[in-house]
């Protein structure tokens, strides 16, 4: 198994370019199923989850050409089955996104429980998807450890309120299900992430009739078919925020290019108004500068445009270097604070209040340690901690990190980090 070996502390300097958004790429790939025409997707991040998603699409019968790195031309006209291969679908959470377009186009889909990070015991189940599909006329049965969803005569428009949680993937899934449904669908209490609007804008450019994506209430008028076109994956806002926090924690000067500063506005406002982290920004770049002193500030995760749950772990590392105490409150996923014990092993002063809250006391002298990455976002937090820490850190199970960050070791090495993959 591969691992990272990192020697710290690091003072980084230079430029780093943000790759395409994982959470946008993993939705546009299955969206190709909705049309029998070719779609060209560019700026695809070359990460494990994207590779798995493309492989799953090919397994269904789609043809994919790769004219250059980061670009895929998909022809889904030849899809000849509606069952997801468990050997692929079990490996990543986003495999659930294939269900809606299969259901919309073919009237049925069979799939195992999706894989991915083992977090959120109560919030990563798929009840919200099944309930949403039922609102459009689909019925679900379970056989041989697989779900089988079928809509006799096709899906029909309906109304669905996201009652359990404001779910990004479920909102996107319901949009795709409703695009080819008969009649009008109204979705309420929707997630508002920029990736949702990007997906809707693309589908509308192909003939779909989606209104108000990016707001709490979305309306979809079903159409008989849609065409296909070109989709450029937006810059990854979580990668942008991760690099900004990395620069702040290591007191480095880093220019982050090919990003959308507005997508991490909440973090930048905290930098400016609370932490004292100096930075400059333009339309597509952010330059983080070293802070003489990092002030403490607690955060509470919230759906977009609030503080992202996917930046909570890196932010906690930053707070180990702040001068004071910070309360970190995770409200989105259960069990997402368990990584705090790994930071404690490195010397962090962290108090676990309950499963949803920790207090981080700083500044702490972090020391290198042998660690195992428990999941994607905790993994990048450990990388940041290793860059702050004194001495050698070994991080195992980096498969989890590379699921979301393309070629991260080489990119950080270009900034001066002492990091190798072995």
Image: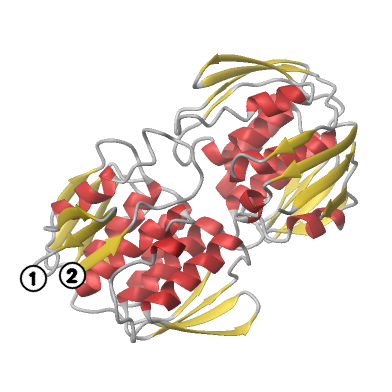
* Image mark for residue 228: none
Q: Residues within 10 Å of mark 2 (few under 14, many from 20)?
A: many
In front here: 340 or 254? 340
Location of mark 2 (residue): 107
Q: What residue sits 79% from the left and 25% below the top?
A: 321
- CB within 8 Å, label 1 to label 2: yes
Q: Quadrant of the C terminus?
A: bottom right
In front here: 82 or 151? 82
Q: Is residue 381 left or right of residue 386?
A: left
Task: Tell me if residue 180 comes above or below residue 257 in the rendering.
Answer: below
Task: Tell me if residue 198 comes above or below residue 66 in the rendering.
Answer: above
Looking at the image, tell me whether mark 1 or mark 2 is earlier in sequence order.
Answer: 2
Q: Is residue 163 visible?
A: yes
Where residue 96 sits: x, y (%)?
A: 36, 57
Q: Is residue 159 left or right of residue 344?
A: left
Q: Secondary structure at mark 2?
A: loop
Q: What residue sits 58% from the left and 69% below the top?
A: 44
Q: What residue sits 35% from the left and 56% below the top?
A: 172
Q: Secondary structure at mark 1?
A: loop
In front here: 370 or 270? 370
Location of mark 1 (residue): 153
Q: Is residue 308 visible?
A: no
* Figure coloring: secondary structure
Q: Is residue 286 left or right of residue 167?
A: right
Where residue 328 sits: x, y (%)?
A: 58, 23
Q: Residues within 10 Å of mark 1 (few under 14, many from 20)?
A: few
Task: Tell me if residue 41 comes above or below residue 155 in the rendering.
Answer: below
Where residue 415 sits: x, y (%)?
A: 86, 53
Mark pair 1, 2: CA separation: 7 Å
Task: Tell me if residue 417 comes above or below residue 231 in the rendering.
Answer: above
Where residue 329 sits: x, y (%)?
A: 53, 23
């Amino acid at each position: 198994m591969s691992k990272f070996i990192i020697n710290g502390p690091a003072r980084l300097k230079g430029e780093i370019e943000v790759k395409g958004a994982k959470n946008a790429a993993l939705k546009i790939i299955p969206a190709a199923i909705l049309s029998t025409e070719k779609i060209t997707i560019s700026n695809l991040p070359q990460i494990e989850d994207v590779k798995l998603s493309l492989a799953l699409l090919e397994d269904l019968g789609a043809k994919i050409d790769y004219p250059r790195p980061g670009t895929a031309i998909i022809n889904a006209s030849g899809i000849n089955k509606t069952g997801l291969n468990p050997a692929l679908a079990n490996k990543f959470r986003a495999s659930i996104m294939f269900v809606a377009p299969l259901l919309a186009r073919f009237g049925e889909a069979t799939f195992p429980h999706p894989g991915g990070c083992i977090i959120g015991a109560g919030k990563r189940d798929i009840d919200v998807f099944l309930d949403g599909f039922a609102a459009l006329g689909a019925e679900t049965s379970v056989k041989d450890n697989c779900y089988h969803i079928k809509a006799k005569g096709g899906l029909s428009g309906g109304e669905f309120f996201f009652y359990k949680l404001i779910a990004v993937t479920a909102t996107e899934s319901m949009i795709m299900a409703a695009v080819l449904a008969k009649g009008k669908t109204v979705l309420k209490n929707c997630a508002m992430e920029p990736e949702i609007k990007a997906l809707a804008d693309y589908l509308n450019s192909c003939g779909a009739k989606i209104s108000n994506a990016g707001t709490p209430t979305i309306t979809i008028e079903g159409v008989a078919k849609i065409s296909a076109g070109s989709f450029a994956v937006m810059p990854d806002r979580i990668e942008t925020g991760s690099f900004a926090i990395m620069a702040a924690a290591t007191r480095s000067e880093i220019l982050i290019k090919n990003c959308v500063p507005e997508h991490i506005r909440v973090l930048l406002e905290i930098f400016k108004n609370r932490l004292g982290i100096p930075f400059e920004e333009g339309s597509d770049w952010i330059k983080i500068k070293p802070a003489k002193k990092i002030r403490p500030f607690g955060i509470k995760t919230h759906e977009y445009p609030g503080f992202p749950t996917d930046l909570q772990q890196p932010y906690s590392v930053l707070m180990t270097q702040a001068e004071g105490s910070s309360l970190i409150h995770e409200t989105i996923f259960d069990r997402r604070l368990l990584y705090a014990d790994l930071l404690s092993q490195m010397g962090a002063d962290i108090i676990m209040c309950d499963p949803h809250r920790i207090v981080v006391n700083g500044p702490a002298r972090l020391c290198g340690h042998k660690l195992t990455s428990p999941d994607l976002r905790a993994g990048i937090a450990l990388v940041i901690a290793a860059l702050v820490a004194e001495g050698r850190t070994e991080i195992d199970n980096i498969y989890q990190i590379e699921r979301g960050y393309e070629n991260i070791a080489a990119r950080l090495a270009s900034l001066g980090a002492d990091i190798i993959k072995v």
